Image (cartoon, helix red, strand yellow):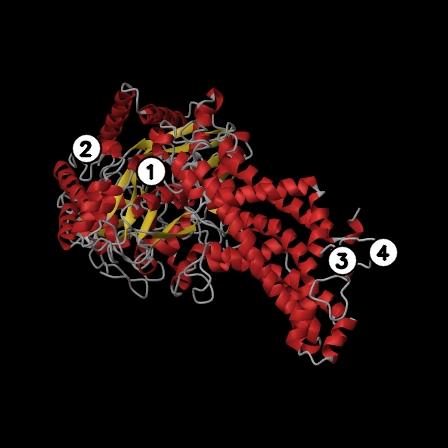
């Protein structure tokens, strides 16, 4: 992770996120560029990242329009069509004009389920990641700014959480919440909310530790001293002075967490403690398809390809964002 | 007894004939599969393949036994271990549904009034270490008596032995003494019945009649939950590997992982008809993926599937491979798979709602989850076609279906009209979400998915709890207080080849037990209970079959349980072993008749 102090150079009293106005040299007119413009120019040079961004937009569009698309050219994702199965052995049948991606073991339309599976993945990607980042940022800010006992407490919680292997911890949380009415008196119910909870509980720690480190550094900067000197309170310093200077690392860590979280959801669903049938999820579909991969390739290939491409796209975008925010990468 | 044996044999021949006739239709491959199974099982039993002594047979299973204690075991997979390690009075050879004397030296003698049954037991049968002494008739008496104790709570003691003089009406805190079991000498046991019981001799083939040494077992049976199972001694050719004090826990029995059978040093081969060829039998458990299980068997690194059949995809692949096809044995199970609805809880305490479920279920789709027509006929009531004139014909045969639908694919319109009659004007249930406990592996998990989708058509939303097959029974569906609204993966095999063994334990309200219960719909209809009590006393076979045929119809009409498959169970053997599938136990492998090639 790049040191954000290298990404932007704030000056005391400057507007959040702003950089110092460029000084004209030789009296010539050089147009000033905002950080956003700098970022955009750098990002668009990365053709792969741009292509991945387009792919993600298309995927979001497909996910949003899933009900319309399914109604037009496919079948409801949870409807079973036993007549589409092989009537001699009950095995799935492959792609056809009626079922574009074939059917699964109980005669469900794989195309529809892949499309609806995108909704789950994107929900996890955006919702769970956002929650984890918000939680991590809040605790990171508090921990780094106040230090002392609060910092010790939060840091030890982070250390303990990070001491567990991610999948093992996620499995434990998801398993505990997958039976009965769920966890926390039914607040976290089995299914999607359990997956989201597992992701938030685990991933806020990564964000929290990163932000804490940045805050420890930023709180000693002159612009923070200046704000304090003019009578700014803790909340104002945290949210008006320090937080805006954390935008770059937050954006970078978010884009890199999204694909990890998509994979974690898929892994939990694959292991049977994430999204459960009949709700469509790529991980759950892959789990069901794996044993019969040799006889029903379509059941494995399409959700597998969707998962692969989505994770790849988010990774490429994440790399592109990181590079674009890193001034050392500037041409 | 000879009459009964002949009748059962005739039924089997009739079934095979029906199966062969079915081949002519060209549409139902289950018929040819059944024929294949018959020949394969017979081949093994006749011993046309030279049986070799020695070697290890490895059985793979997804789950564990329901109970390791032979007095508690009541599950097809458990019987694979129980009948290899224990000797009930009667037992079964692999290709027969007729019991043969096992611990008994001859078939039981029934008095003219049908109220006294005398059995003589063999000499020379001894308990395995650490007991080591010879078996006496008192050991059989104690074995049956302990089944009535709450610490053992046999799932069928009351159903089959409740008519003994002096038998307690309910489970007792301590092992009771039953005056109707007399042991005039060490090799004779006499059963005195309150009234004639038509099929009492059938019950003598249950594992509860396998001897248990009281002086050794009583301290375990006096516990709140008996731990005799973990210290059991054997009388069969094999014993679960134990230590010097008899403990098997963590040694030969690692729950959910391994059951290791080794030779019983005190077994006397001259007293038994079991060849017991292999030196060691390993039951490796925890194979949640049936495909992995199947591939291990096909590759020869394991020898047979113990509790889970190959998936439909694997069945198709094996059937299309000439070399592998011979390794697959289909056995007509004589039992049926059904969906059990908890009739004690709303909404299934209403007949209309249950009937709606019976109509809405797509039984063809459910059969496809297990392999389609190759896996058997779609069931429309409980007595299986293999019973022929022993109850199947009397219950209406293939023509009786109280919930008909085109191609068995369900009748949603009729189901909705029944829901309206039940008080749901929209034709859809509007109450809270229901619970369903189902298998966590295919094909059972797929069946559950089909059931959930069908129930949703009439508004019955279910939350599915997925567990192993044995956990589904032992923690949920067998325990009335934990029983969910729907148990979609239950399967009942008759305890012996009589229609009573299909219907009495499973649907008679008198046989509901607090644990180890097999009346999964918790059906308790006084008029039905009364009819069953009367039918149990009928000695005349043709009258008995007619009575049970009528009861079958009535039970089916209650829709507490909805039958959907009369299964021909596929058992896959490796090419390294001589196959032996148990016709009496739903196609389970008989490890005492298998041999390593």
Residue A125, x across and y down, in percent: 56, 52
Q: Work out how far the residue at label 3 is from the one at label 1, CA to CA, in angstroms.
A: 61 Å
Label 4 secondary element: loop
Kindly identify which residue carries mark 4: A27
Q: Residues within 10 Å of mark 4 (few under 14, many from 20)?
A: few
Q: Which of A114 and A284 lies nearest the eye of the viewer?
A: A114
Residue B264, x across and y down, in percent: 48, 44
Residue B286: in sight, yes or no? no
Q: Mark 3 or mark 4: which comes first in sequence? A: 3
Q: Which of B502 and B576 lies nearest the eye of the viewer?
A: B502
Kindly identify which residue carries mark 3: A7
**Which residue appears at 39% of the width and 36% of the height?**
A72
Label 2 secondary element: helix
Q: Left of A2 or right of it: where is B551?
A: left
Chain label for disc 3: A
Q: Mark 1 or mark 2: which comes first in sequence? A: 1
Q: Left of A325 or right of it: where is B502?
A: left
**Which residue appears at 41% of the width and 52% of the height?**
B471
Kindly identify which residue carries mark 2: B397
* Foreground tag (1 vs 4): 4
């Amino acid at each position: 992770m790049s040191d954000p102090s290298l990404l932007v150079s704030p000056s005391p009293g400057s507007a959040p996120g702003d950089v110092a106005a460029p000084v004209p040299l030789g009296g010539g007119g050089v147009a000033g560029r905002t950080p956003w413009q700098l970022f955009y120019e750098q990002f668009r040079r990365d053709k792969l990242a741009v292509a991945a961004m387009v792919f993600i937009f298309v995927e979001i569009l497909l996910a949003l329009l899933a009900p319309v698309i399914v109604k037009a050219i496919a079948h409801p994702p949870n409807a079973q069509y036993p007549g589409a199965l092989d009537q001699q052995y009950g095995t799935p049948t492959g792609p056809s004009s009626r079922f574009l991606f074939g059917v699964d073991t109980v005669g469900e339309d794989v195309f529809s389920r892949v499309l609806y599976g995108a909704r789950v993945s994107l929900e996890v990607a955006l919702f769970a990641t956002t929650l984890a980042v918000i939680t991590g940022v809040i605790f990171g800010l508090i921990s780094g700014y106040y230090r002392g006992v609060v910092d010790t407490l939060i840091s030890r919680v982070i250390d303990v959480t990070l001491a567990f292997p991610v999948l093992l911890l996620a499995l434990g949380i998801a398993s505990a919440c997958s039976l009965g009415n769920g966890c926390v008196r039914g607040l976290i119910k089995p299914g999607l909310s359990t997956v989201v909870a597992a992701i938030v509980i685990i991933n806020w720690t990564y964000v929290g530790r990163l932000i804490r480190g940045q805050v420890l550094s930023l709180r000693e900067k002159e612009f923070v001293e200046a704000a304090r000197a003019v009578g700014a309170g803790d909340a104002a310093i945290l949210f008006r002075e320090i937080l805006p200077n954390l935008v770059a690392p937050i954006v970078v860590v978010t884009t890199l967490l999204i694909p990890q979280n998509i994979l974690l959801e898929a892994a939990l669903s694959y292991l049977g403690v994430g999204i459960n049938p009949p709700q469509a999820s790529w991980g759950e579909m892959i789990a069901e398809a794996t044993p019969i991969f040799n006889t029903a390739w379509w059941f494995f290939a399409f959700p597998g390809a969707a998962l692969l491409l989505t994770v790849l796209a988010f990774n490429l975008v994440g790399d592109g964002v990181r590079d674009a925010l890193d001034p050392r990468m500037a041409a | 007894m000879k009459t009964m044996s002949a009748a059962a044999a005739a039924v089997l021949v009739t079934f095979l004939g029906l199966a062969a006739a079915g081949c002519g239709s060209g549409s139902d491959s289950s018929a040819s599969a059944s024929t294949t199974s018959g020949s394969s099982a017979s081949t093994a039993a006749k011993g046309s393949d030279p049986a070799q002594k020695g070697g290890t047979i490895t059985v793979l299973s997804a789950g564990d036994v329901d109970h390791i204690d032979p007095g508690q075991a009541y599950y097809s997979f458990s019987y694979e271990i129980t009948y290899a390690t224990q000797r009930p009075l009667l037992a079964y050879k692999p290709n027969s549904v007729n019991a043969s004397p096992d611990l008994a030296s001859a078939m039981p003698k029934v008095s003219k009034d049908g109220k006294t049954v005398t059995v003589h037991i063999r000499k020379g049968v001894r308990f395995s270490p650490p007991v080591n002494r010879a078996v006496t008739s008192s050991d059989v008496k104690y074995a049956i008596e302990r089944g009535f104790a709450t610490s053992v709570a046999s799932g069928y003691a009351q159903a089959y032995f409740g008519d003994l003089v002096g038998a307690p009406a309910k489970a007792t805190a301590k092992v009771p003494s039953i005056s109707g079991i007399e042991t005039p000498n060490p090799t004779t046991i006499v059963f005195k019945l309150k009234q004639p019981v038509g099929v009492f001799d059938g019950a003598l083939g249950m594992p509860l009649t396998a001897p248990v040494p009281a002086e050794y077992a009583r301290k375990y049976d006096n516990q709140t939950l008996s731990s005799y199972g973990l210290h059991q001694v054997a009388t069969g050719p094999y014993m679960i590997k134990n230590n010097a004090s008899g403990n098997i826990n963590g040694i030969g029995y690692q729950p959910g992982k391994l059951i290791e059978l080794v030779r019983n040093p005190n077994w006397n081969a001259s007293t038994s008809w079991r060849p017991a060829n292999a030196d060691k039998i390993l039951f490796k458990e925890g194979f949640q993926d049936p495909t992995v299980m199947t591939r291990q068997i096909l590759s020869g690194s394991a020898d047979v599937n113990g509790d889970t059949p190959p998936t439909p995809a694997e069945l198709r692949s094996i059937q299309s491979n000439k070399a592998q096809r011979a390794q697959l044995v289909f056995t007509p199970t004589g039992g049926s798979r059904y969906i059990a609805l908890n009739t004690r809880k709303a909404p299934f305490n209403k007949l209309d709602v249950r009937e709606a479920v019976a109509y809405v279920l797509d039984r063809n789709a459910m059969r496809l989850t297990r392999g389609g027509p190759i896996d058997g006929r779609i069931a429309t009531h409980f007595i299986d076609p293999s019973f022929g004139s022993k109850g199947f014909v009397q219950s209406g045969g293939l023509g009786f279906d109280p919930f008909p639908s085109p191609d068995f694919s369900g009748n949603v319109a009729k189901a909705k009209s029944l829901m309206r009659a039940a008080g749901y004007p929209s034709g859809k249930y509007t109450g809270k979400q229901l619970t369903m406990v189902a298998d966590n592996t295919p094909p059972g998990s797929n069946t559950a998915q089909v059931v959930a989708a069908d129930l949703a058509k009439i508004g019955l939303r279910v939350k599915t709890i997925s567990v192993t097959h044995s956990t589904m029974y032992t923690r949920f569906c067998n325990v009335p207080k934990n029983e969910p609204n729907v148990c979609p993966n239950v399967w009942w095999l008759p305890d012996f080849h009589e229609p009573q063994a299909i219907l009495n334990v499973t649907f008679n309200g008198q046989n509901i037990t607090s644990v180890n219960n097999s009346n999964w719909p918790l059906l308790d209809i006084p008029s039905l209970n009364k009819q069953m009590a009367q039918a149990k006393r009928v000695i005349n076979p043709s009258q008995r079959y007619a009575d049970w045929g009528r009861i079958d119809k009535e039970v089916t009409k209650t829709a507490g349980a909805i039958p959907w498959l009369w299964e021909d169970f596929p058992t896959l053997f490796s090419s390294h072993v001589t196959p032996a599938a148990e016709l009496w136990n739903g196609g389970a492998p008989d490890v005492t008749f298998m041999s390593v090639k």
